[in-house]
Amino acid sequence: MKLLEALRVEGRIEEARQHGLLQLIEHPLHAELHYEVASLHDMLGREAQAIHLYQQAITLGLAGSSLRGALLGLGSSYRSLGQHEAALVTLEQGLALFHQASEFTAFRAMVHYNQGRHKEACEALLGLLAQSTADPSLTPYKGAMALYAEDLDRRW
């Protein structure tokens, strides 16, 4: 994995991907390696090939921040390929396991947008913005944004 990491850091993504695939032949039960190779496929726009690798990494018992990354990568890959229901299931799984992981909320909002659920998408992103912004021009409005994120159509 050291060579794979070095190649990735150097920006030699295709070489890292090829090296990773060779390593998977030697270590087919290595969850972290499956995750790393899946991520490399993702970086190269090969989401269709990344999906199986993410799934395998998760099945093999990936844990912690790597599991978090694999679930996000898998959900994002599904979304990129138009597999919106699978994306939602995966992103919801990520949210259930990692409650404070706002990246799952952001990517779920993208799926909602793709599904034509624009209100839900906008509300989720507005809520996320209210939680996370440090922009001094927005911080006075965090409360209002959080309130509007509950229901953009609500009138007072």
Image (cartoon, helix red, strand yellow):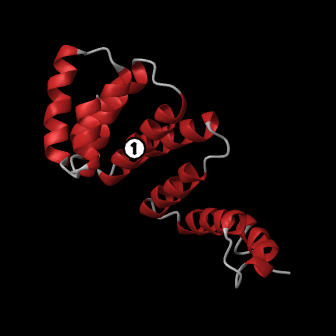
Near-viewer residue (61 or 118): 61
Q: Which residue is found at the position 25% from the left and 15% from the top?
A: 27
Q: Is residue 129 shown left or right of residue 30?
A: right
Q: Is residue 8 shown left or right of residue 32?
A: left
Q: Is residue 57 shown left or right of residue 123?
A: left
When the figure is inspected, residue 5 is found, relative to residue 1, above or below; the finding is: below
Q: Which residue is found at the position 47% from the left and 60% from the top?
A: 110
Image quadrant holding the C terminus, namely bottom right
* Residue 74 lies in quadrant: top left
When the figure is inspected, residue 117 is found, relative to residue 71, above or below; the finding is: below
Seen from this angle, which residue lies furthest right?
Answer: 156
Near-viewer residue (89 or 104): 104
Q: Is residue 90 shown left or right of residue 45?
A: right
Q: Which residue is found at the position 35% from the left and 45% from the top?
A: 78
Q: Is residue 41 visible?
A: no
Name the residue that disc number 1 marks.
73
Image quadrant holding the N terminus, namely top left
Residue 11 rendering spot, x and y as whole percentages: 22, 52
Residue 117 rendering spot, x and y as whole percentages: 52, 63
Secondary structure state at the residue bearing disc 1? helix
Q: Which residue is found at the position 23% from the left and 50% from the top?
A: 10
Residue 16 rendering spot, x and y as whole percentages: 19, 39
Near-viewer residue (8 or 58): 8
Q: Is residue 14 visible?
A: yes
Near-viewer residue (123 or 156): 123
When the figure is inspected, residue 19 is found, relative to residue 95, above or below; the finding is: above
